[in-house]
Amino acid sequence: MSTTSSPFPLLIVALPFLAAFAGLLLSRWPRTRRPQPGAAEAKGQEAGHQHRGGNRRAAWIAVLPTAVSAALALWLAAAQGFAFFAERAVDPVGADYGEIVTGTVPITLTLQADALSGVLGVLVTLVALAVQVYSVGYLHDDRRYPSYSAFISLFTSAMLLVVYSGDLLVLYVGWEVMGLCSYLLIGHWWEDRSNSRAAVKAFLVTRLGDVGFLFGIFVLGISADSFRIADVLAKVPEMSTATLVTATMLLLAGVAGKSAQVPLHTWLPDAMAGPTPISALIHAATMVAAGIFIVARLFPAFLGARPTLDVLAVMAALGMLGAALAALAQDDLKRVLAYSTISQLSYMAGGLAAGSDHAAIFHLLTHGAFKALLFLCAGAVIHHVGSNLMSQMGGLRRELPVTFAATTIGFAALMGLPPASGFFSKDSLLLAMDGAVSGAALTDAAALLLYASALATVVVTGAYSARAWLRTFFGPGRTIALPEPQPGTAHVVDTREAPPTMLIPIVLLAVPALLLGFAGGLHLDVGVATISVVLALLGSGVVYAFWRGDPVADPARILGPFRVPCERAFYVDSVYAALFVRPILALSRLVVSTDDRVVDGAVRGSGRTARGLSGVLRLAQNGNVQLYVSGVLAGVLLIVVGAVMFA
Amino acid sequence: MSGLSWLPVALLAVPLLGALLLLAPPPALRRTLRLYGLAVSGVVLVLAAIMVATFEYGQAARMQFTLDLPWIPGLGVRFHLGVDGISLPLVALTALLTFLCFVYLGVGDGRGQGQLLRPRAGGSRPRALVFTLLVLEVGMIGTFLALDLLLFFVFFEIVLIPMYFLIAVWGGKARRAAAVKFILYTLLGSVVMLLGLLFIWAQAGTLDMVELAARHGAGMSRAVQVIAFLAVGIGLAVKTPMWPLHTWLPDAHTEAPTVGSVLLAGVLLKMGTYGFARIAIPVLPEGAAALAPWLGALAVVGIIYGSLACLAQRDLKRMIAYSSVGHMGFVLLGFATLTTVGINGALFANVAHGLITGLLFFLAGAIKERYSTADMPSITGLLATLPHLGSVLTFAAIASLGLPGLAGFWGEMLALLGAFDPAEALSRPLFLTFMVIGGLGAVLTAAYFLVMLSRVTHGLPGSKAVPVPPGTVLAASGPGDEATGPEASLAIGPSDETADARLEKTGERIGLLSHMPDIRRYEMAAWVPLIVLILLFGLWPGLLLSLTTPAVEALLGVVS
Amino acid sequence: MTEAAPFLPPTTQEVVFLLLGAVAVGSALLVVTTKQLVHAALWLVLCFGALAGGYLVLTAEFVAWVQVLIYVGAVVVLLLFGIMLTRAPIGRSADLDSGNRVVAAVVALATAAVLVTVVIDGFRTAYAPLKPGEGAAGELGASVFSTWVLPFEALSVLLLAALIGAIVLSRTDIRGAPPSAGEAGGDPAPAEGPGGP
Amino acid sequence: MHIVYPAVVSALLFSIGVYGVLARRNTILVLMSVELMLNAVNINLVAFDMWLADVLHSGQVLTLFIIVIAAAEVGLGLAIVLALFRNRQSVDLDRLRALAEPADPATTADGDNGAGGDNGARADDHQPAGLDTVTSPQLTARGNGASDQGDGVGRPGHPARRGGNA
């Protein structure tokens, strides 16, 4: 495979990167003195004008480069004929920008687009563009909009680096910078301590996985003697199974962290503390999908490591069903979507475990479209209601008709109802899992568990989608007195429908959410498709029945006594807190006291011992000169005796 | 190249003459002291820049700008200076950080609280400060230039005295004790190191580092090398500092003035690690191979231990000091691997740590000035009160926790990569364990920095402080602008618990009520170069790695 | 410088010298043990006189006379003045010895033992014939004013300095400057600005 | 004449002088003892001058010089003694103890309450070794933040200002 030289990948990555710096540095230039926070309310009007101007400039700085990047990415993918959907390999397009010597395997700076990265680049830039435009409206009064949009630009750049990078360590750079942006953006409303905590948690949990990821890169890179992805993949057949299993297991840790898979999934629901567009971009469409992307990228290595695939299958099976059940019990609309994201990502992981990277990436693309759409719609709803809680929503279909329509498309795609995009991708995933049961890719137990769990998840997905849809847009309107906007929530606007900057992205995203499924070429398996549609309708039907019985009550009561554990996501957080967080904090206190008492105590002890000894000697220093002279003379005598005797 | 051999001498002579000139006419210089320090260190910086510019990068492994004169002929001690790819970045870093310290002290109207060069009540002794800093610069640069073991030791020791005064004269409340602890502890380490150096001399018969390094330990038996490495290593480890020889560091950092902390973290710690790269490992390869597992073990203990200690700290400066213990653990781990990549990583981490922690201490100093305390729980909402300062603090913390794309990452990553594939003489499973522990330490590093950010920069500002009419408090405690004004007047009271609480409360109120400026111009001038360099090295690590790699390979004997 | 057999019978001069030496040592012992201050000074006179005799025996006539003149004549008188000026009690006083008499005795005995042993061991056989007139005033004067004239002049300056010093020390109308509190010793550069409280 | 005789007399005289210097309390008696020691030296000089048959008479000339210096020394010494007597009303050597560290009230106080510990309220920053008061800045050195701005900065171990003896 020869690389066709092209500067496009670099441009696509660099533009948002430069935009990020420009946005941070130039938006408030020349700097105006910001009034003190106490005075801000009094001068609210004036201050609003001041930063609105800056926001406008920041918006242009943010949106334009992203748009150019999106156009370039589209062109790049189009030039390759969207080869991914056609499932044919193309020569990568890109360029080499030199090497960095390290003393061992060098780092190569390669940016290239092949079939896989081409389409993913399009997804990332398009969703990012939509989110940037949406945010202009969503945060138009926010004083910190410039930094916010700059962070999104930085994130876009990092994600594109992950997508286009031809070298594992360069990829890791993008991988981590994404995590940073996620941290910064989750903590956007840092006045609220819980947002800050959520941001820290998100960063730390993913970082834990990333350490494994880095080690996995080490294993692959050292055994392939190159960090270039192409070289690594070329060397995979020569590597021992043990090496591959070690490497892929370690990589899997990073994947689990980034893509919120089972042991490390707990950060994602908390990450919903960030502004909703962020949830759409980072925590639904792109960053969390990066884990899936990596597995697909290095799929040959994973195929060589069967035990890893089994582990992945079990993780996916547990994750998809558990998260779906948790989604069914949540009251916070965004948390419903967050658990839904975990569940859908597990679907993709399951598809990968079943041996079909194509299906997984296909679902990744459609999911990116419809989940981003759902989040943006949820944002519009939350913007309107002023609360995240579904118990405070209801009957919104008349007030927000456009949003309602878009959300309906989104939920249809999520449930996998034809003709929405989700139907096709989910169908190909189920097909792959079905094939894995009879195939040899997985051990039988894992394959069976995976397939059964996937089918059950289809039911639960139908149920929670229907519940969220019904409770948000139907039933009696629960008009409640709007509370003062806390720093942790979106600003309340009084317009009936969201502003156009928010609506246009929603409408634009609804199109791929509805139609993207047809891009993959219609190879349906009628049997599997029928089963999945029937199961999804079954789930939603049950919920509908319960809801009809009492439109005000929460249909989650079908879970019965199981509801509280579901709502708490099976107490994983508490277990982690008890197992890891508290012991570490206790240990750190222990270290501090040890440091003081033992380590430094030894130092101080030596000082004290010296002083004690000197205290003994001090007794001689009583000021009596004659005693001193006696000592001196005695010393001289000793020296003389010594000199006489030994000389 | 011999045409430029005056350059290293000039690097030493300029600050030394600058310092000596200060002794001569007391009143004439007083007005221009701020500019004077700036000018002298600026000249040194220019000289260092010339050195960087004229360095032959194709031959980074070779000593350049060498100067070799007899110094004490009877002992065979030579005045031997020179620069290669390992020391060049450190010389430049030293010149830069000293210059930035003078910028911090002297640019603008000099009214900033950290700007000690302005004569003020209570005696800030500006002339002595400039003198001290210049002498310190001589010692620091000399350490990195020296190519003779005894000369190295002399410069290594020269540094201690000005640093002692810096802490003891311009430090915080418990400065005396911290300064005494600093000097006693490091002197003790130095003595052990001197014994080791003399032992090498006795065994090898020469003090010339270049020759010793070229021999790669030939002529010294294994036992000799182990003993010498132990002695030299302990001396360097105290300076580095390596766990468990680190306890002087938090005290010294907590009490030192801002510029002292910056230079202490930015340069002084580097002298210890530089010694490993320059003396301990190349001169005593067998000793290094024998003791590397221990070095690695102590290094990873330091990483974990430092991180855990940070997690439970309340004092910002103390926390940053402990974070140095953790970061230096990565540096030592890199050395312990005895591979090119590991030592490369260590040297990179060294420079990166100098930049990042220097910046962090500048920031901590700025915060301490504004809030009159570095107690983290009593500082909240920094991003709301002082958004720019909070942003830069966030940047520095993120750089320090090793985010890829910023300078802190590459060193740690390469050190871990070195541990993944250590030198052949070392046990691989052991170093794999070290690598895993180090990786977990990286997570803990992220944890404490994020917790710190969450505590300090996030949240609502001063939610605990009750607003009171400005006149009452301020009138009671004098102008809050003075460095020690509000504290000194209150601190004389009885030292029981309630007084403490009252002090904290009042300090907080004063901090909130008095005019708290965001980043000032002189601070900006001092910090921006650091920020730019952190970004530059983070985005293009090849700048530094291409410089150190050939030199490290030569030292390890990989190529020759 | 002559060596001789160790056990020659003592000559007359030697006997005289030994007797004078015994007187000197004995009176010196009384100087350091007597309970009366003034007696101590007087025993000192006896000691010095005996020593002057010893010098005579050793053919150092000029030194002997100088000893009598300066030591017995001047120094002891000075000491007596000192005793009187410090209002020392005349008569027996019980506390002329300080607490570390034992230590002092031990050290002194050890000194004596070491010195005597070493001296006897080293000069057992050293013998020098006595030639009268060697230490006469003329002989010595020639030496002092030729070879030793420079030290001699230096000594005169020293004497002058001692004179002035003694005057300054004993004058009561000159007050010493109060000890300065603001000294900052050890500072690398001289203190700047207001030093401190 | 055997050189041993004057040498032994000189040694004994010197030892007696040593005893006097070490054991006598009155300063003037100490001065007398010093004179004894000087005379012991003189005997030696004269005896060895004779033994060496020195044409330059170095020994005897030196003896003369010593006698002169001794006279000067006694003069100066007595002046000092007088000055001392004027200031202290005493010439007793063992009552002149300004060289000792002053008796330390902190020592007894710490010994009494025992709870003062290392970081007790008495701890100030004039401690010479200071190693045991450093770790808790909240406790140490409160109350002298203002007073120690400028004094004695360069002499952290000044003995006369010593604080607690932990």
Image (cartoon, rainbow, N blue to C red):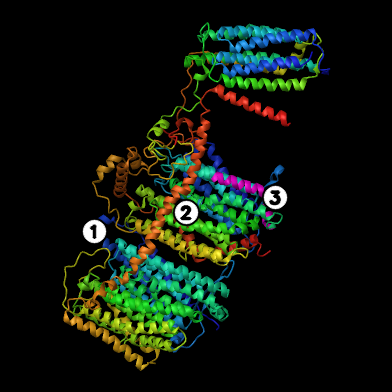
Question: How far across and down, in percent of the image, does residue B344 sit?
Answer: 57, 62
- Name the amino acid type tagged 2: Gly
- Name the amino acid type tagged 1: Glu
Of A49 and A146, which appears nearest the observer?
A146
**Alpha carbons under labels 3 and 2: distance apart:** 39 Å
Residue at image mark 1: A41
- Given the current orientation, which residue lies at the most extreme bottom position? A526
Query: Which mark is drawn over residue A335?
Result: none
SS of the residue under disc 3: helix
The magenta segment: B186-214
SS of the residue under disc 2: helix
The quarter of the picture where the N terminus of chain B appears is bottom right
Q: Is residue A543 left or right of residue A215?
A: left
Residue at image mark 3: B203
The crowding category of the residue bearing disc 2, from other C-alpha atoms within 10 Å (few below 14, some 14 to 19, many at least 20), is many
Question: Pointer 2 indicates a residue of which chain?
Answer: B
Residue at image mark 2: B358
Find out whether the residues at labels 2 and 1 contact each other: C-beta distance under 8 Å. no
Residue occupying the point 42% across, 52% down:
A592
